[in-house]
Amino acid sequence: MKLRIDYRVHRYNAPNHVKTHMTSRVLDFDRVFSLCSSMATDALRSQVAAKWQDAFTRLNRSEPGISGLMTFSQAWNLATEFLRPKDITDPHQKKEYDKSSVQAALEMVNQCRRLPVLLEVFLEDMRKHYYLINREVAQFMQEYENTEDPIIISRLVHRLVEWYKAWSPPQELGATIFSAYTLTFQTHLFSILPPSFSRGFKALCVSTLPPSDDSEPPPRDPRMWVAFENLGLLDRYESIVASVGYEHIEAHVLATCTGEWSKPMMEGLRGWMSDKMVSWMLLPYARGANTAEEARAMLQGIGSRFDFHMNKTLCDLRTREIFDIIIDFPDSMGALQDLRDCLQRVDQRSALVQSLRKANRKRLLHPGAETKLILSQYVATIKCLRIVDPPGVLLFKVADPIRRYLRERPDTIRSIVANLVGDDDSGDSLVDEHEPIQPLQQPDIEDYSDPNWEPEPIDAGPDFRANKPSDVISTLVSIYDSKDLFVKELQVLLAQRLLAITDDDTEKVEKERRNIEILKIRFGEAALQVCEVMLKDMTDSKRIDGHVQSQKASIVHPTIISRHFWPSLESSDIIMPGQFQKLQEQYSKEFTIFKPDKRLRWLPHLGTVHLELQLEDRTIEADVPPLEAAFIELFSERTTWSVDELIASVGSVDRTAAINALLTWVDLGVLKEDTEGTFRLLEVAEEPSAASGHQHMRTAPSAPELPQVASVQQQQAEQMKVYWKFIEGMLTNLGALPLDRIQSMLKYAPGYDRTIDQLAAFMEAARREGLVAGRDGVWRLNT
């Protein structure tokens, strides 16, 4: 028997799945069987014969002859012709098929177990005809690249759906074949889409977003998102769809929240998300939801990611603005609350610290910034970061560079003390008026037996100590290791303020007394005993002056102070001439009668003199410093003096100070500079002229605002000069010594209380003057 059989051997090349089909051949069954018989055993021959007969029976369906096989061949041809992809742009290829015939043909192929082969043939035909789709994709993309109009991408997507539906197999073949078709169609589609398609796809998604304002949103097109899903674009470009939402949220946050610090913005942003974004999210992320609960469950994941991105965007914005937010405090309280809430959701604490430290270095911690400004910003930073991070870890990390920089500034202590006593001219107080006055707090040792004890935060550094929140003054004083520096500076400032008080300003003394009483609460009574003595001296001085005036009236009203309790006052060699000298001697005589055990030592360079000058054609009244009064008194003896003669008559005076004093009278029209360095008294006023203008420029104010009291640094320098004799003796007798050895030996000197850092600074100053030489921490005298 001879049988003609169509058979195909399929070879698959792994990368491309290219199928190679062999041509049909006529095989002689007997020849094959005899060939097998010569090569195999009887059992194998029997098995091959059974398989062969089973295949033939299945295809022929037990019909006589090969009539069944012929019927299968017709069904196969109809099925492959029906499934073969058509060119939908060519109307001639459109052909109507009898639905029942096609269904019967497919059923026969299925009964003969040839559906897998039919699927392979169909997918191969689709691959061969995919150039039709590729041609249209190229046309649409060329048009888009020329116009950048996302509507073209929308038209392309809908056109691809038409191709997809036109080539799709009937549902009767089952979900497996349809899934294989969809996967193959999408795979070929993704391979032909150019790189510009992703840009156009993103632009198309952006065009569907709702506007941030109250304008009319674009019309919703559910068909477009269904088309995206059919073509597999949502899965392939999932990151692009998400980025569209992220960027829209970010743009809205930046547009509405930048510079808006007065009120919290997070609640409004979440309201905008619910009103605007959720309706847009339904189409790409919850298309198949039938109920609100299903939609809520489907949107939970993407909604959480969008909410996180909104928090992160707002946190990044506030991190960039943090320096200006601190400047605007307390009007920026809303921004701080937003930042606190965002940091609980987003781990941006390290970025906040780095941003603020960088801004401080650039805009605050430089020589151009005043110490008052740095202190004000530091106090505002303390208050703001306590709101953002109550445990204080962020404040500890941010404040450390500010504290180190303030410690190096020479006027930091004076600025803090001036603000404490209300002597700050800027009007911006570092201390809140409503903040209760508290004693200075010392660092507490952790009590691990406390039932309310909590461990330090995980991002706290090794030096962090979770102390109780202290007031601002305690924080400022803690910049230095000891409060003694503040107490000494307070004494200096109080001395200046008290010595500047005139007879008519008794209320200022009471104001200073109230300030000291308040400061006692902070620093303790023992630390301010010297200040109490200074205030008592002011009261006693007024009482003593009243007694002296009752015994013998005088126009001199001195302030009498105790030399041992007041800071060192800068000395001067001025000798008051003429009537001033007589008035001082008369007052000293009466004082000695009242206080026989005490003597007055006048400081004539301090104070104010009220003068009334009676000239030939006018009378001039002026309140001037003692040096100006001394010079004009000398002009009562003769009308012309040189600068050198005036200086010699009043004692050792700096020439610049002398010229400034004379220029005061030139400005008042009392003196005139005839030649350089020679001044003449004008008994009769003269009209000012360009030629008669004085030749000197005033280099400094003629009278300082406050009396010249030696600063803390100057007092320390003077005291260290005393200890230099001890250091010199050590290095002479013992040779070269390390710094710590010098420090330990100086502790035996009376009154020595300097730190090793202060000693190192003094030794460095001595080295610059050539007194000592230092190398590797060892100091020796210069020989």
Image (cartoon, rainbow, N blue to C red):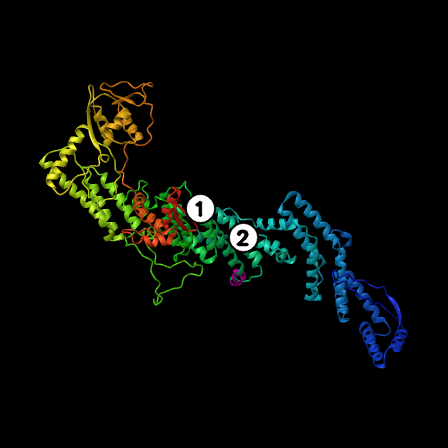
Residue 614 versus residue 263 in the image, above or below: above
Which quadrant holds the N terminus?
bottom right
Under tag 2, what secondary structure? Answer: helix
In the rendered structure, which disc, 1 or 2, sits on the residue that comes first in sequence?
2
Give the image location of residue 469, x and y in percent: 34, 56
Q: In the image, what residue occupies the spot 22% across and 50% down?
A: 529
Front residue of 230/15: it is: 15
Give the image location of residue 669, x and y in percent: 26, 22
Label 1 and label 2: CA atoms lie apart by 33 Å
Amino acid of disc 2: Tyr
Which quadrant holds the C terminus?
top left
The reply, left or right, for residue 590 in relation to residue 295 is left
Helix, strand or loop: magenta stretch:
helix
Give the image location of residue 737, x and y in percent: 38, 52
Residue 364 versus residue 285 in the image, above or below: above
The reply, left or right, for residue 465 in relation to residue 236 is left
Amino acid of disc 1: Arg
Q: In the image, what residue occupies the spot 76% across and 71% down?
A: 111
User: Does residue 76 appear anywhere in the picture?
Assistant: yes
Under tag 1, what secondary structure? Answer: helix
Q: In the image, what residue occupies the spot 59% across and 55% down?
A: 239
Q: Which mark is residue 361?
A: 1
Near mark 1 (Cα within 10 A), the count class, few <14, some 14-19 or many ≥20, is few
Return the residue at label 2.
Answer: 246
Highlighted magenta segment, given as a residue range: 293-300
Front residue of 46/317: it is: 317
Q: Which mark is residue 551?
A: none
**Magenta stretch containing residue 294, yes or no?**
yes
